[in-house]
Structure formats: structure tokens, C-alpha cells
Image (spheres, rainbow, N blue to C red):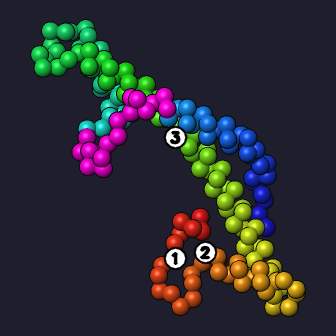
Amino acid sequence: MKTNRHQTAIPQETITQINTQIGAISAQIAPHAIILTAQERRDILKMGDKSLAFVRKAHEYAHSHPALVPGYMDLADFDIDFADANNLLGLLSRLKELAQQIEDTAMIAGSEAFEAALAFYSNVREAARRNISGAEIVSAELKERYPGKKRGKSAPEDKTESQ
């Protein structure tokens, strides 16, 4: 068996506190958040790390050369958009790092739990073959829930269940 990398349980109190803090963050951003449709997400002009430098420089020049700002453009709106985009991209980067840590930890914990369950199931099946008391019931129950391919069904395996 592989080395168990996830050996310390995360206390339920910690999970509860994190969920509370996530709720508080959600409540703070909610009045300012904009929800896009899938079509809007596809169609919108996107600013990322590469275009941030361009936008930053254009913002600086718009303030240092106000005569070049088009009449139809509101510089105060540009200030708001630039500041929020800049700040939110920083927050997004930190949240993505945190999400990656949570995802990686969940993946390792899930993998190790699944591996342990498979070892247990294998042992239970062997015990059932040897007619050990109670093993047949446990084996039958686990067989029903086993995420692998079901016999006699042509439906593809649901990979989200087994991950």
C-alpha cells in the first residue's frame, strides 16, 4: 500500500469556521457582485494578466493627458473599473491558490479513502467466499454501491462518483 499522505484529520470545528468565513465573504461581495449569463461570459472583452499592464498604462495616460480622453468616456467610471478590476484580480489569484490547496487535499484524502475502501471490499469479498459470518451481507451491500461498471447495463460509468 502507498504512503498515506493525509494523516491528520481537519477538525469539524475548523471546517465550520471556514464555512462561516466563506459565508461572510460572500455576504460582503454580494451587493457589488455582477452575475453574467453564459453568453455574456463568452462575448465580453476579457482582461487578464497580459492586458492588465496595457490597461494600467492607459489609465495613467488618461489622467496625465485628460485632453486625449474621448468626450463619451467618463474618467471617473474608468477609475472605478480599473481599481476594482485590479483589486479583484488580486483577490481572485489568492482564492484560486486556496481553492487549489483545498482541491489537492480533498483529492488526496478521497484517493486514500477510496483505496482503503477497495482494500476493505476486497477483504470482505474474500471473507464472504469463505463463509465468514456477516461477510455476505456486507459484500452484497458494498457491491450495490461499488462505483465501477454495473453488469448488464450499457450505460457509461459515472466518473464523478468514483473520484
Q: Amino acid under label 2?
A: Pro
Which portion, as a residue range, is magenta? 27-44
Q: Which residue is mark 1?
A: 157
**Given contact means CB atoms under 8 Å apart, are the residues at marks 1 and 2 in contact?**
yes
Query: Earlier along the polypeptide chain: callout 3 or callout 1?
Result: 3
**Disc nearest the viewer among 3 and 2:** 2
Q: Which residue is mark 2?
A: 147
The location of residue 2, given as percent across then percent down, is 77, 63
From the image, which quarter does the C terminus lie in? Answer: bottom right
The location of residue 13, given as percent across then percent down, is 73, 41
The location of residue 23, given as percent across then percent down, is 55, 36
Pick whichever, 100 or 151, lies toward us: 151
**47 vs 37: above or below:** above
| Image point (53%, 65%), residue name | 160
Determine the CA span between mark 1 and mark 2: 8 Å
**Given contact means CB atoms under 8 Å apart, are the residues at marks 3 and 1 in contact?**
no
The location of residue 80, given as percent across then percent down, is 32, 20
